[in-house]
Amino acid sequence: MQDQPTSAELVGAVADFIRTHAMPQLEGHAAFHARVAANALDIVKRELEIAPEANAGEHDRLKALLGADGSLDDLNRELCTRIQAGELTLDTEGLKDHLWATTLAKLAVDQPKYSGYRRALEEENAEK
């Protein structure tokens, strides 16, 4: 295991290189694809930085909600099964909060500049 630079730092450096050095020299489809590549690297960087804690929180919420243990994938499948069967609804204590927290965590990785996400964070912070 390497100490420095971290995987997130390496990915960030490559994304920065693409944006600041490569993209200005490109046009048309090549520039578009470079922008897509830089954006994909930004997502990977956020995934490396945010996902471990977010996944742990999701896993803990699912265990409490379902009264079961297993991998995150298994618990999510169980959640879907129970929702589809009508065993869990939005009236089930904790489900709505779990879904909201999970959605915000996924948006933090995928689309942190999304206006709806930013508004939701502002509203959440105002309530605290």
Image (cartoon, rainbow, N blue to C red):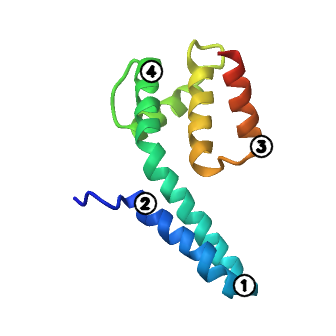
Q: Earlier in the sequence, mark 3 or mark 4?
A: 4
Residue tagged 4:
66
Residue matched to label 3:
115
Left or right: 77 in relation to 95: left
Q: Residue at image x 74%, y 25%?
A: 123
The answer to the question of whether label 3 and label 2 lie on touching residues, with beta carbons closer than 8 A, is no
What numbered label is drawn on residue 67?
Answer: none
Q: Distance from label 3 to label 2 (Cα)?
A: 26 Å
For marks 2 and 4 on the same chain, the one whose residue lies earlier in the sequence: 2
**Whole-percent x, y for residue 15 in the image:** 54, 69
Tell me the CA gap for discs 1 and 4: 48 Å
How far is mark 3 from mark 4, CA to CA?
A: 32 Å
The residue pinned by badge 1 equals 29
- Disc 2 vs disc 4: Cβ atoms closer than 8 Å? no
N-term mark: 3 or 2: 2
Residue 52 in picture, x, y percent from top left: 40, 42
Tell me whether the residue at label 1 lies in contact with that at label 2, contact meaning CB atoms closer than 8 angstroms: no
Please report whichever mark, 1 or 3, sits nearer to the chain's N-terminal start. Answer: 1
* The N terminus sits in image quarter: bottom left
- Check disc 1 and give the amino acid type: His
Of tags 3 and 4, the one toward the viewer is 3
Q: How far apart are marks 1 and 3 (CA)?
A: 27 Å
Foreground label between 2 and 4: 2
Residue 85: which quarter of the image? top right
Depth-wise, is mark 3 or mark 2 nearer the camera?
Answer: 2
Circle 4: element type: helix
